[in-house]
Image (tube, rainbow, N blue to C red):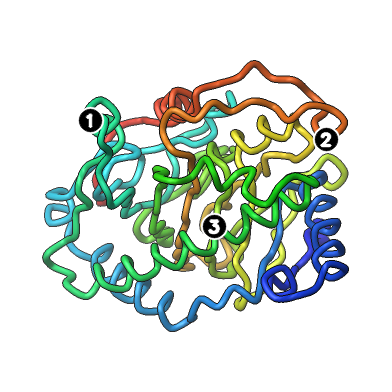
Amino acid sequence: MTEPRIPTIDLRPWLDGGPDERARLARTVDEALRTAGFLLVTGHGVDPALRTRIRTAARTFFTLPAEVKEKYAARVAGRGWLGLGAEANGYSEGTETPPDLKESLTFATREPFEDPEVNAEWYAPNVWPTEVPGLRAPCEEYLTRMAELESHLLSLLGGALGLEPDFFIRHMDHPTYGFNINWYPGREIVGETAPGQFRIGPHTDFGTVTILDRQDGRGGLQVHTDDDGWQDAPYDPAAFTINIGDLMARWTGDRWRSGRHRVLPPPADAPAEELMSLVYFGECTPGTLVESVPAPVGQVAYEPVDSHVYLREKLDSITVGRATAG
């Protein structure tokens, strides 16, 4: 299978380059997001050793007995552990699939909100497993770096549309966000896969920008485009995989695509393959009204939506229930 046309961009010219370099980079980003909704981004400055520390600590948790992990069980979009079968992401796009073959540790916004109603729905303290004391510090450092990187990317996206650099950033003064550590174990853990079952079923993300640190594998990420159908996503260990979500696609009036993707099940010829992804889901400040940018930038004028009413509906759509690993 050939790889989809997803470019790798170096972020440094946007941060430090002159007007011509920035303009060229903005054009590349605009074209890529019109076709696949994905980019690979280098020059981000995030230490790979930090990502390794998180994976090492998280694997210690995921390989604990199920009854230990169950103490940290959470609902989708909560804080804690999601066991096998807790989500079926395909349902968010109307694709009926069996539950996804993954476990997750899920974290979110660290600072409470002033509005008690917003606080009640979108904030709770993150839950750090006491059995893995080495997890919290690298995760919190990573989330600080993700917030910085997200701000740079949103500035670049504003430039790619020919808008002011703070067009998106001004809606992110106190955003919610999600951070998942997704563990994709082999078949000795998940068992035989059902027809149409994936590690994560086909879907688009729901928010603004997703920043993915992934591992390469036979049962890994695939991206869908109109021209090429499902194709293995290109991989660069130095790069983050970036895709835009549904809210950003609506915001741009469908000029940019919400990148459709899935994660394949453990392959039959490598049944013990195990992968882990670090996934940062960018979102807006609660109460943000997302209105489509008018033509000639936007192509479709969507009805304005409250960002977090939209997010809650999407999150509810993929919820299957809590299930323990076995």
- Residue at x 78% of width, y 51% of height: 160
Question: In the structure shown, which secondary structural element does the residue marked by tag 2 occupy?
Answer: loop
- Left or right: residue 319 versus residue 47 is left
The residue tagged with tag 1: helix, strand or loop?
Answer: helix
Q: CA distance from mark 3 to mark 2?
A: 22 Å
The residue type indicated by label 1 comes to Ala
Q: Which residue is mark 2?
A: 297
Q: Amino acid at mark 3?
A: Glu
Q: Residue at x 44, y 38 (%)?
A: 285
Which residue is outermost to the top?
A: 303
Kind of residue at disc 2: Val
Which of the marked residues, 1 or 2, is nearer the chain's N terminus?
Answer: 1
Real-space Cα separation, disc 1 to disc 2, in angstroms: 37 Å
Residue 295: x and y, percent? Answer: 84, 27
Q: Position of residue 216 (x, y in %)?
A: 59, 70
The answer to whether mark 1 and mark 2 are in CB contact below 8 A is no
Q: Mark 1 and mark 3: span between their CA atoms?
A: 25 Å
Indicate left or right for 272 with 253 as reference: left
- Numbered disc 3: secondary structure: helix
Q: Residues within 10 Å of mark 2 (few under 14, many from 20)?
A: some
What residue is pinned by disc 1?
120
Vertical position of residue 247 compared to residue 142: above or below: above
Query: Residue drawn 24% across and 65% down?
Result: 61
Q: Are marks 1 and 3 in contact (CB under 8 Å)?
A: no
Using residue 44 as the reference point, say whether residue 85 is left or right of it: left
Disc 3 marks which residue? 150
